[in-house]
Image (spheres, helix red, strand yellow):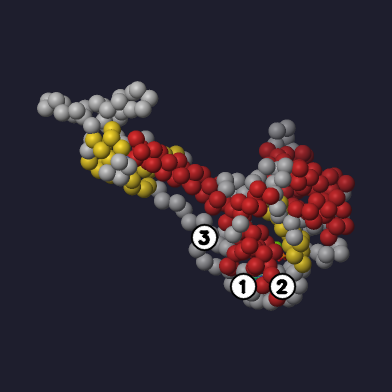
Amino acid sequence: MTDNTDNQPRIWRCPQHQVEYGPDRIGERGYRMDWHCPDCERERSRTERALQAEHQRYEHWKHSSGVPTRYRCAVPASIQPLSPSAKSLRAAVQAYAGDLRARYEAGSGLVLIGPPGLGKTLALAAIINEACKVYRGPVYATWPDALASLKAGIGGAKGDPRCEAVDSLRDAPFLALDEVAGVRDASDFDHSELFGLIDYRYREELPTLVAANATAAQFPGLVGERVADRLRETGPQLVLIGESQRGKAALDGAAAFEEPPRSIKVRTHNQGAWRERTITFRDGRIAA
Ligand SMILES: Nc1ncnc2c1ncn2[C@@H]1O[C@H](COP(=O)(O)OP(=O)(O)OP(=O)(O)O)[C@@H](O)[C@H]1O
Ligand SMILES: [Mg+2]
Ligand SMILES: [Zn+2]
């Protein structure tokens, strides 16, 4: 506390917010005001929350999004317009990633089908990478892997976390399910697991993007008619054609999601003067 020997009222004005504050100023609710400008304080805590949220989104992307290492740098612009088919893929991915909030609100997805090496996984990863910057929790997974994990979990010890391999995909804000037609000789169990997942997300209006190595004619038979029907309703289907680009177009560049800063500086008006304060993120939270 500062001395108040000259008996001047301890009231100051923030030049930025034009607010009077100080312990001798009674605020609107009848309380003594603080030594800081209240608007500066509000901005500081908003900045703190934003930094914390950005770190949480980043941590999710890094450790829990499932995006494979090879596709960590994928962004919509990584899809080169190498052919008419790649051009429409690039346009679809750019449109989707540029409009994430509306797609989320509408629960709309995307279906990518076609032969190997045409950028399906690249496209899914690019969208999940972008979505991770805005939402906490988008996930990329391949359907054969998720299903294999589930089966291993069921065969494992009681409480094996792999039992959640499929259920844990249910509530992701965006789900990219790759190789959705990639389970050989799918059994009734396999079909019903896929249907359960897709139908849950359909009912909850959560966006699901899928890719499959198949032709348009094979697709419904491979994933099941009821799955195909739901996917048809929630998003456009892109059929890719052409030669595999694998090994032809290099995919490199910086990580799609840059690590947020560890600390940022903010100014607050305190006792009549500007004070610089540092907001620091450490050990998973804003440091006191
Ligand atoms: N349009 C493109 N622009 C740039 N790179 C591309 C394009 N299409 C494919 N590639 C590159 O080719 C490789 C294979 O692409 P990707 O893994 O996305 O294929 P895919 O369609 O998922 O194939 P598969 O069905 O075999 O899984 C990747 O390294 C990717 O970067
Ligand atoms: Mg692929
Ligand atoms: Zn202020």
Q: Which x, y percent locates residue 86?
A: 68, 72
Looking at the rendering, which quadrant does residue 8 occupy? Answer: top left
> Mark 1 against mark 3, which lies toward the viewer?
1
x 74%, y 75%: residue = 242
Horizontal side of residue 97 vs 157, given as left or right: left
Q: In this rendering, is residue 227 above or below 170?
A: below
Quarter of the image with the C terminus is top left
Residue for badge 2: 85
Q: Is residue 168 left or right of residue 255?
A: right
**Residue at 65 percent of width and 67 percent of height:** 91
Determine which residue is flagged by label 3.
255
Q: Quadrant of the N terminus?
A: top left
Quadrant of the image occupied by residue 151: top right
- Which is nearer the N-term, disc 2 or disc 3? 2
Dot 1 crowding, Cα within 10 Å, few <14, some 14–19, many 20+: some
User: Which amino acid lies under the numbered mark 1 shown in the image of this protein?
Assistant: Gln
Label tally:
3
Q: Amino acid at mark 3?
A: Ala
Numbered badge on residue 80: 1
In the rendering, which numbered label is found on residue 4? none
Q: Earlier in the sequence, mark 2 or mark 1?
A: 1
| Ligand 1 is within 8 Å of the C-beta of the residue at disc 1 | yes
Question: From mark 2 to mark 3, how far is it between C-alphas?
Answer: 26 Å
**Residue 65: image location, x then y, percent:** 60, 50
Circle nearer the N terminus (1, 3): 1
Cα–Cα span, label 2 and label 1: 10 Å
Q: Element at badge 2?
A: helix
Quarter of the rendering containing residue 122: bottom right
